[in-house]
Amino acid sequence: MDINQLVLLVEEKLKKNILIQNINIEDKTYLHKNHSSHKEGKFHLLIKIKSEELSKFNKLQATKKIYKILNDEIQKYIHSIQILIN
């Protein structure tokens, strides 16, 4: 899977499972290319979400919800996720 396909899939899954007003997903893999733990085909994503639904949860609960939704993608394609919730 390439990064564009992954971004579309992540956005689609999050929108399907969470009421989202705005979402922006950025590929930050280039920042980690020289790290010893970097693996080809595993991506680093920055996800910025504006969601009234998620804002009702504390940060840990909201993050767990996102991780549960993206579990398959995390196992296969995502090395790291940075999540910013508004």
Image (cartoon, rainbow, N blue to C red):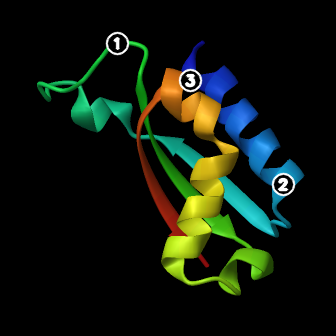
Tag 2 residue: 17
Q: Secondary structure at mark 3?
A: helix
Horizontal side of residue 36 vs 61, given as left or right: left
Horizontal side of residue 73 vs 30, given as left or right: right
Tag 1 residue: 40
Under mark 2, the amino acid is: Asn
Image quadrant holding the C terminus, namely bottom right
Residue at the (36%, 32%) spot, across then down: 29
Residue at the (64%, 41%) spot, across then down: 70
| Position above or below: 14 against 19 | above
Tag 3 residue: 3
Image quadrant holding the N terminus, namely top right
Q: CB of mark 1 within 8 Å of CB of mark 3?
A: no
Under mark 3, the amino acid is: Ile
Residue at the (70%, 75%) spot, across then down: 54
Foreground mark, 1 or 3, reads 1
Under mark 1, the amino acid is: Glu
Dot 3 or dot 2: first in sequence order is 3
Q: Residues within 10 Å of mark 2 (few under 14, many from 20)?
A: few
Foreground mark, 3 or 2, reads 2
